[in-house]
Image: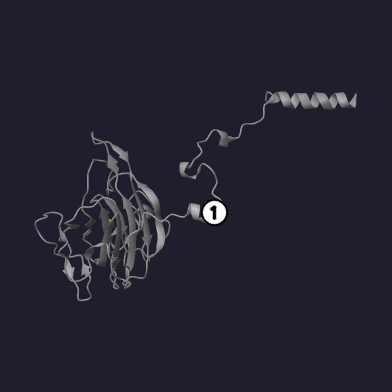
């Protein structure tokens, strides 16, 4: 009799789920298959060693200079690669300093590169003044705009909090940086940026978002994030179709103005 009750107990709980085994979720998800790694398993190391295509040699020394295949946008005493945004016929009028850097000339307006770019690796160095003034968004605010539209914020956030999606190294009003990696005011910061441009169809609709990775002083602060459109101060991101476009540096009009040096770019395609 005892065995009868055990049997009833087992049947009852089996029938609650219709007697079926749970289906693992993984069975419903897509699985990545690598065609090149299918077929017969190699048995020697040589079978998985490639010798082509050979990557080009890029000279990266001495430290602080641009790689040999980069387009140098500023590394000496000339702003020849830059013009006014307001009037591209007018050369950039920002101030050249004796130490091979240049500084925002207040209320002279944003400047842009003469050249236009798509996918790029961008390096630039910037600093705020040691004697810093202002607070919130008015403390050595500038910015680097990829394709003239998408801002990576430059700001002195040292002892100066602001909204976090507008702080230094944010993708302005879209992505909070993963860390705050600023050096003290008056010291040089570096940005290393990997940027892939958005793609649009023939009707002007966006079919692929731009993506961006940013290292601030060597620290990962934006990890391949999707840029959702333009980065306006007021309003939603916009997504009008565009092709290659210049890099813009921002004159925010602050009393404490940002300086730049050693700017170079490598085109990625
Ligand atoms: Mg800014």
Tell me if I can see residue 113 in this picture.
yes
Residue appearing at x 51%, y 38% in the figure: 31
51, 220: nearer the viewer: 51
Where is residue 256 shown, x and y percent of the image? 25, 67
Q: In the drawing, does residue 168 fall left or right of residue 93?
A: right
Where is residue 58 shown, x and y percent of the image? 32, 64
Is label 1 within 8 A of ligand 1 (CB to nearest ligand atom)? no
The quarter of the picture where the N terminus appears is: top right
For disc 1, the neighbor class at 10 Å (few under 14, some 14 to 19, many from 20) is few
155, 206: nearer the viewer: 206
**In this figure, which residue is indicated by the disc labeled 1?**
44
Please identify the quarter of the rendering in which residue 86 is found: bottom left
Tell me if I can see residue 161 in this picture.
no
45, 83: nearer the viewer: 45
Q: In the drawing, does residue 182 fall left or right of residue 199?
A: right
Q: Is residue 238 depicted above or below 259 in this figure?
A: above
116, 4: nearer the viewer: 116
Where is residue 106 shown, x and y percent of the image? 18, 64
What's the colour scheme? one colour
Residue appearing at x 31%, y 71% in the figure: 64
Residue appearing at x 9%, y 59% in the figure: 90
Residue appearing at x 42%, y 59% in the figure: 179
Q: Going by the picture, which residue comes out furthest to the bottom?
A: 98
Q: Is residue 118 depicted above or below 14 in this figure?
A: below
Q: Going by the picture, which residue comes out furthest to the left?
A: 89
């Amino acid at each position: 009799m005892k065995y009868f009750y055990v049997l009833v107990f087992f049947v009852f709980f089996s029938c609650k789920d219709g007697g079926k085994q749970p289906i693992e979720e993984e069975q419903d998800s897509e699985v990545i298959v690598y065609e090149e790694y299918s077929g017969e398993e190699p048995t020697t190391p040589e079978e998985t060693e490639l010798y082509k295509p050979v990557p080009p040699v890029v000279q990266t020394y001495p430290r602080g200079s641009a790689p040999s295949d980069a387009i140098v946008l500023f590394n000496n005493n000339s702003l020849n690669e830059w013009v006014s945004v307001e009037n591209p016929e007018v050369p950039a009028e920002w101030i050249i300093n004796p130490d091979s850097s240049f500084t925002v000339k207040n209320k002279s307006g944003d400047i842009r590169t003469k050249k236009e770019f798509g996918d790029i690796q961008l390096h630039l160095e910037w600093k705020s003044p040691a004697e810093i003034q202002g607070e919130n968004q008015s403390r050595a605010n500038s910015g680097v705009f990829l394709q003239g539209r998408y801002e990576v914020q430059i700001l002195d956030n040292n002892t100066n909090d602001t909204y976090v999606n507008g702080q230094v190294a944010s993708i302005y009003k879209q992505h909070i940086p993963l860390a705050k990696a600023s050096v003290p005011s008056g010291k040089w910061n570096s940005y290393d940026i990997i940027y892939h441009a958005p793609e649009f169809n023939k009707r002007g609709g966006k079919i692929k978002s731009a993506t961006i990775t940013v290292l601030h002083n060597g620290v990962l602060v934006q990890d391949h994030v999707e840029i959702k459109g333009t980065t306006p101060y007021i309003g939603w991101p916009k997504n009008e179709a565009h092709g290659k476009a210049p890099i813009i540096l921002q004159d925010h009009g602050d009393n404490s103005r940002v300086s730049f040096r050693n700017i170079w770019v490598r085109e990625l395609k």
